[in-house]
Amino acid sequence: MTASKPKVVLTMQPAELVDKLMNPTQWARLDAVADVDRDVIGDFHADGLDDRLAKADYIFSGWGPDARIDAETLAKMPNLKGIAAAAGNAWRLLTPEALDEVRRRGILMSNSGYVNGIPVAEYCMAMILMANKDFFRAERIYRERREYINREVEFPTAGNYEKTVGLVTAGSRIARHLLGLLKGYRLNVLAESRSMSEEETSSLGAKKADLETVFRESDIVSLHTPSLPATKGMIGAKYFRMMKDGAWFINSARGAVVDADAMIAELKTGRINAILDVTDPDEPLSADSPLWDMPNVVLTPHIAGSEGTELQGMGENVVNELTHMIKGEPLDFGE
């Protein structure tokens, strides 16, 4: 008699997200180790779910659902052994009380935060290379003039040889991945981090520096600080005034970490430049913001994180982690 496969239930909003996270190969891998209930649960508190919840061994979650799992709902899943999230963490699926119970019961949790951070680091790497090459101004003036552009005359300081790139909160997982990418280029890297020693920073190909040094000496400053009450508006006028003439500020982290008014005031002088994938308030940027019309500002609509085919990277991670859970193997990204 063949043993039955463990039951996996899906939860995310919108339900169609699962079709972006999973491709046929990944479905086949998951189906090989589990019995997947593909009717996505959008609300664990909806009527008629008790039987499905009672059979659940594992949860595959994305962003959402509408309401978090509370202790009462968790009690309806006596067989639950693990939660694998195609998102930065798994615990946001749970209320605080349910999270305590999950930990008491020894239910495994896994996240895709590192995987989701890979395209953010790649975005920053691409922006660093293009900003140093003066790509954005070159594209603009070539389109405007429609004539020969003498690059030696027009872009005398462009290029990625021996430029200095500074990372703020370099100990974050995205910044650490970016440090790995930067190692392959002829760039000098400064890293501001309270969590990394000088030795660890050096092993990642960078030089440890304080925040003022990063802003004062870098040709490009890339921000990787989380949005917390303590970090709100921490990058203010003082730091923007320190930046070199022609330097670039990249924000792919959170807009709230930056004093927007101070940044805009310095950008209006035309002395510095910015690449902003995030703003404060959160995207979309208000239609009347002066940032839209500044030639020294590049705006993107929060695209640094996983999008399109990159979402399948998180789906692959969930399949990997559920397989590890089912086989009793160590997790790659457990919480």
Image (cartoon, grey):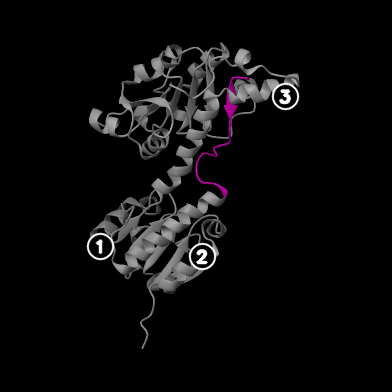
Pointers 3 and 2 in contact (C-beta within 8 Å): no
Q: Which percent across, then down, holds residue 257?
A: 42, 28
Q: Amino acid at mark 3?
A: Arg
- Where 24 sits versus 181, above or below? below
Q: Regarding mark 3 in the picture, which secondary structure is present there?
A: helix
Q: Which percent across, then down, holds residue 314?
A: 46, 53
> Is residue 109 or residue 56 the one in the foreground?
109
Report which residue position mark 2 lands on.
Answer: 25
Q: Amino acid at mark 2?
A: Thr
Q: Amino acid at mark 1?
A: Arg
Asked if residue 281 can be seen in this view, the reply is no
Queried whether the magenta region covers residue 263, the answer comes back as no
Q: Which residues are magenta?
A: 295-308
Q: CA distance from mark 3 to mark 2?
A: 43 Å
Give whichever of discs 3 and 2 has the lower sequence position. 2
Q: CA distance from mark 1 to mark 3?
A: 62 Å
Q: Which percent across, then down, holds residue 78?
A: 32, 70
Label 2 Cα neighbours within 10 Å, binned few <14 / some 14-19 / many ≥20: few
Report which residue position mark 1 lands on.
Answer: 105
Report which residue position mark 3 lands on.
Answer: 143
On the picture, is 115 further left or further right than 150? left
- Where 255 sits versus 310, above or below? above
